């Protein structure tokens, strides 16, 4: 190979550099070798090589001096003024300065500190573009030889080729490493791992790929909030505390620059960074940082930033490499999010269906409240869920509670707390809208005091509306600051709508039950009044008439036998009518029940029954009148049906108080086949018991006897 103007020694030097390139030596080793070869060949006091950066700065990548101070400063120096580096940058041609005292600009200041008096520089072009500059300098008083530019140009042309080859190898390796990193992330996504694992993997892979000290993945949330979802440190520093931390957009920092422009950003002097997000970097000792946007399905989702904590700057092409990585990372995040959203949607729909089933079955409100609080807590991954009812007097009463650990909370169901201050329950009561508090340390009021005692770091709440009125609130809390999902408020609303329906249904059922109970009570009062009227009115008049008739019969003369006989017949008829009236009155409202209670009334029923009755009454006190009447009629109707239809040899009656319930059981061993649908007696009993909030069951298989059992609440 023959190169015009290049001597044999120079060719030998270039061959040595080419061997390094062929062996795949790192770029910094090639740069150092080039600087050393040029310094020796041109007998210069110093040779250095610098790379031009996209932001009009330059970075020294290699240096060789006769004194042995070959360590490059590896810092960025602004291009400008009158000096060799600026002249080459502006013209793209070789330049010479025989008197460096006339040089100006930041580069000139650095050169003069090194004692340089004159120098020559030539451009380094890589694949047709200006890549950098090579300078040879002298500390002596004599200028460099006149052919220095030509010799330097001849050398830099071949050096440019060597650098291009080295860069191609590096870029190929970087591409391969990047592809391998992305494949590892894609494998995680395909395996359906949680998003937090994907974010952590993305941060780690990007950090290793770019040789960074710290890497972070941030998500932009509504309201100008930035949430860290993944973090990595090259030195193994624990970073979990950084994940889920939240800051605000504003100032001069990576999060804000990317958010405002939607483009990559770079800060080579992080001391100048400002804003809330910059505070995290200052605490971690950032010296420089680069950020790039993460776009998911065409929308700015977040950003990824890499930072260095040492003196060495991040690579000049860090933005480009980071952008290429975040494009595929965005796809990985989109896939991970899609999986999570689909799973979350399925879990949420399943939870809503379970709650809706309870509502449709008219489950008691307390059962619905307990189910809703648990379902919400599990679906949104909260640590605490509470449901409160707004009551008069500015208080809210807990009607449902759930904790992830199962440990008791600082309050219990039925516990009222005063509204006021800044907390979810109070804010919802004031606005009627969902609220979120990401830092519960700033909250206040009685609710906030209890929440902090329990360990709240963040919370969200949604209103419960019933029939157009604000009924209560559902609150979820987390022990991790801002760990609740961004869309938590909207997801809570879906549950509170079902809760409102359940409460409306329960209130309607309660109103219906109260109405039925009032009807039963009114009917019982009417019976008692009729019984009193018969006893105090018609019955007493008949008794008086019978007594007077007997008096008349006693006064009849001796020969009035026929008249006495007829009066006796009338008196007997009055006695029969009186007995019949007493039976009617007893059927309307048994006197024994009113006078002595359930035990003597049931004993009277058992004595009058046509078949033997084994009676067990375990009631030590008088019960509410409506309960005693219902129990009496259950036993009366059951014994009457048994005597008429069952053909049973005997019956067993058990009446016992269990907790807050009276249990009445009537069993026989007759022919069975009884049914609530046959006849009005059993239907009437069912209505009476259910009107009091109780339940009644009938088990009567043909040929195997009948069991009628009623459970009547005492309250």
Image (cartoon, grey):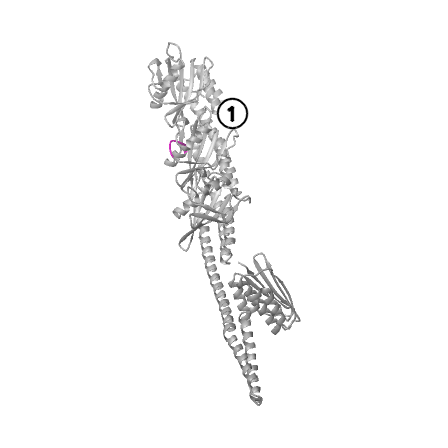
Q: Secondary structure at mark 1?
A: loop
Residue at 38 percent across and 47 percent down: it is: 431
Q: Is residue 699 visible?
A: no
Residue lying farthest bottom? 559
Q: Is residue 512 left or right of residue 666?
A: left
Q: How many marks?
A: 1
Choose between 199 and 475: the one closer to the eye: 475
Above or below 247: residue 515: below
Asked if residue 253 is among those painted magenta in the image, a careful observer would answer: yes
Q: Is residue 198 visible?
A: yes
- Which residues, given as a range, are shown in magenta? 250-254
Residue 193 screen position, x and y as percent? 52, 42
Choose between 165 and 80: the one closer to the eye: 80
Residue lying farthest top? 141
Residue 175 screen position, x and y as percent? 47, 33
Choose between 495 and 214: the one closer to the eye: 495
Quarter containing the N terminus: top left
Quickly name the residue at label 1. 23
Q: Residues within 10 Å of mark 1 (few under 14, many from 20)?
A: few
What is the chief secondary structure element of the magenta stretch? Answer: loop
Residue 52 screen position, x and y as percent? 39, 25
Asked if residue 152 is among those painted magenta in the image, a careful observer would answer: no
Residue 380 screen position, x and y as percent? 49, 45
Q: Is residue 224 left or right of residue 174?
A: left
Q: Is residue 252 left or right of residue 187?
A: left
């Amino acid at each position: 190979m023959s190169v015009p103007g290049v001597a044999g020694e120079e060719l030998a030097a270039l061959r040595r550099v080419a061997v390094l390139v062929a062996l795949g030596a790192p770029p910094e080793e090639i740069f150092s070798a080039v600087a050393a070869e040029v310094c020796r060949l041109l007998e210069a006091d110093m040779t250095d090589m610098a790379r031009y950066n996209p932001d009009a700065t330059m970075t020294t990548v290699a240096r060789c001096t006769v004194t042995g101070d070959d360590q490059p400063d590896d810092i960025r120096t602004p291009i400008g003024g009158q000096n060799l580096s600026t002249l080459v940058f502006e013209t793209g041609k070789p330049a010479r300065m025989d008197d460096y005292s006339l040089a100006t600009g930041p580069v000139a200041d650095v050169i003069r500190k090194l004692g340089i008096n004159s120098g020559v520089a030539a451009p380094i072009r890589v694949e047709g573009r200006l890549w950098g500059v090579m300078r040879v300098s002298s500390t002596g008083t004599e200028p460099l030889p006149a052919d220095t530019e030509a010799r330097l140009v001849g050398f830099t042309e071949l050096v440019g080729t060597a650098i291009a080859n080295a860069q191609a190898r590096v870029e190929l390796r970087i591409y391969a490493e990047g592809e391998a990193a992305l494949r590892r992330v894609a494998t995680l996504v395909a395996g359906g791992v949680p998003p937090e694992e994907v974010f952590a993997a993305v941060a780690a892979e990007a950090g290793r790929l770019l040789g960074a000290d710290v890497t972070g993945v941030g998500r932009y949330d509504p309201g100008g909030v930035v949430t860290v979802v993944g973090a990595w440190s090259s030195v193994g520093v624990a970073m979990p505390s950084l994940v889920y931390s939240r800051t605000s957009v504003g100032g001069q920092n990576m999060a804000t620059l990317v958010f405002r422009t939607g483009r990559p950003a770079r800060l080579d002097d992080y001391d100048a960074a400002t804003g809330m997000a910059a505070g995290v970097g200052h605490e971690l000792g950032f010296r420089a940082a680069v950020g790039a946007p993460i776009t998911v399905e065409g929308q700015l989702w977040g950003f990824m930033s890499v930072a260095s904590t040492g003196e060495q700057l991040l690579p000049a092409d860090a933005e480009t490499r980071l952008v290429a990585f975040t494009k595929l990372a965005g796809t990985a995040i989109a896939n991970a999010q899609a999986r999570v959203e689909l799973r979350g949607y399925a879990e949420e729909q399943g939870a809503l269906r379970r709650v809706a089933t309870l509502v449709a079955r008219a489950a008691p409100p307390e059962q619905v409240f307990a189910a809703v609080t648990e379902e919400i807590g599990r679906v949104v991954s909260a640590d605490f869920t509470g449901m409160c009812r707004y009551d008069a007097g500015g208080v809210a009463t807990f009607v449902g509670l759930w904790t992830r650990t199962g440990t008791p909370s600082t309050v219990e169901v039925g516990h009222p707390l005063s509204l006021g201050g800044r907390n979810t329950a109070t804010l919802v009561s004031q606005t009627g809208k969902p609220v979120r508090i990401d830092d519960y340390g700033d909250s206040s009021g009685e609710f906030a005091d209890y929440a902090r005692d329990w360990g709240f770091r963040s919370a969200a709440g949604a209103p419960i509306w019933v029939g157009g009125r604000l009924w209560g609130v559902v609150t979820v809390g987390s022990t991790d600051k801002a760990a609740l999902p961004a869309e938590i408020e909207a997801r809570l609303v879906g549950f509170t709508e079902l809760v409102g329906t359940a409460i409306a249904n329960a209130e309607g059922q309660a109103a219906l039950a109260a109405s039925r109970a009032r009807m039963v009570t009114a009917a019982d009062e009417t019976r008692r009044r009729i019984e009193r009227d018969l006893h105090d009115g018609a019955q007493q008049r008949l008794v008086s008439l019978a007594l007077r008739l007997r008096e008349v019969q006693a006064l009849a003369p001796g020969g009035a036998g026929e008249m006495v006989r007829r009066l006796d017949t009338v008196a007997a008829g009055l006695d029969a009518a009186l007995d019949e009236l007493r039976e009617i009155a007893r059927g309307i409202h048994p006197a024994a029940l009113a006078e002595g209670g359930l035990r003597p009334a049931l004993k009277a029923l058992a004595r009058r029954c046509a078949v033997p009755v084994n009676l067990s009454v375990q009631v030590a006190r008088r019960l509410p009148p409506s309960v005693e009447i219902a129990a009496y009629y259950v036993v009366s109707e059951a014994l009457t049906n048994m005597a008429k239809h069952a053909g049973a040899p005997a019956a067993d009656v058990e009446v016992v108080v269990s907790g807050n319930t009276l249990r009445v059981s009537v069993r026989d061993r007759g022919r069975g086949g009884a049914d609530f649908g046959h006849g009005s007696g059993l239907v009437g009993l069912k209505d009476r018991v259910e009107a009091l909030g109780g339940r009644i069951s009938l088990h009567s298989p043909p040929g195997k006897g009948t069991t009628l059992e009623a459970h009547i609440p005492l309250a």
